[in-house]
Image: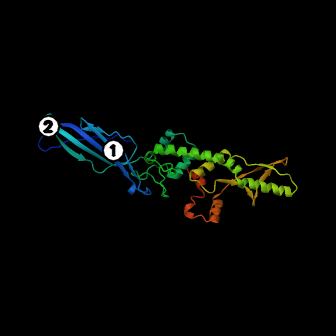
Amino acid sequence: MPTIRVMAELQTVGAAAPPIARCDWTVILTFNGGNCKHSRNRRIDHPVINARTSGNIFTIPFTQVRGGDLTVEVTIGFGDWMGTSVVTERSRGLKIVGTNPTTAALSREAIMKDCFKRLMRHESGLRQFNPAACPYFSQDNKGGVGLCQVTVPAPTDDQVWSWKENLKRGLEIWRDKETEARGYPGRMRKRKLFTDLVADYNQERVKASLAPLTIRLPDFTPDQVERATIRLFNGAPEVYEYQVRMNGNKLFVNVDATGTTGTAEWEQVTAAMRTAIYDNVGKDKDKRGDPDYVENVYRKPSF
């Protein structure tokens, strides 16, 4: 938060101002999202600050990173030891706005993979605020915000106004999605969909007087994990970044030289394939997201 020092002065006409005995301060900082696009009228309040000073200068002790409309009210006690009078005044039109981080600041704050840097640039253009008075809320009106467009779970007040907290949460989401992506092959091996494909494949071999195979489905490569993580970061799609490769309506299998084992394969779901799948199930076009999201992330420059 910025360091804000305020000063109270008594002004009189034709005579010296009496000495200030004390100042009682009230500071209110409120963000009302009604003037910010896609904010869904979110309101965020900094805890009200009340303090007393013996002098006329006050450094506001903010405890949270926040922005919005700032009101400073002061009640001045003045006079001598024989008696004290008071007068109250408040500020008008003060506002605290945000500043977007530089790429140098981002790099100092956290260790990030190159793909995550590209993802942030794709999601937000590296902006926490747009314009300065408004956190950068997601254009889909789902309440996402900031550098990483944190959406689910709903971003906290800190993640709305602090780019550092937004980045921290974005990296947490990335690690969670990376774990989910890495575990996807193991989950697919146990699914009835895959075991039925294996059974059908071996049944065809038996009909052809061939011995059934032990068929394995490999883990993702590091590149596949990365791409699958990028896809998952954008949401929980009905269609993952990779699917089991098929040969028509049958499982595609590479048979080893011994003829006893085989390996299934993963294939990337292209934008055209993804669109065709959504067309087939009749998914509303405004709910499909970007079918080429992963490639569009990679097209962004890193820093």
Identify the residue under disc 1: 48
**Residue type, mark 1 in image:** Val
Residue at x 32%, y 46% (from the top left corner): 28
Which percent across, then down, holds residue 211? 85, 51
Q: Position of residue 113 (x, y in %)?
A: 57, 43
Residue at 63%, 50% in the rendered image: 228
As helix, strand or loop, the secondary structure at mark 2 comes to strand
Vertical side of 233 occupied by 82: above or below: above
Q: Return the residue nearer the eye: 235 or 136.
A: 235
Counting from the top left corner in percent of width and height, residue 120 is at 53, 49
Is 104 positioned to the left or the right of 65 in the image? Answer: right
> Splitting the image into 4 quarters, where does residue 196 fall?
bottom right
Q: Amino acid at mark 2?
A: Gly
**Mark 1, secondary structure of its residue:** loop
Specify the farthest residue to the right: 209
Q: Residues within 10 Å of mark 2 (few under 14, many from 20)?
A: few
Left or right of 288, for residue 45: left
Q: Is residue 224 visible?
A: yes
Residue 83, disc: 2
The residue at 19%/44% (across/down) is 87
* Depicted 6 relative to depicted 39: above or below: above
**Picture coordinates of residue 236, whole percent (x, y):** 59, 53
Image quadrant in which you'd find residue 50: top left
Dot 2 or dot 1, earlier in sequence: 1
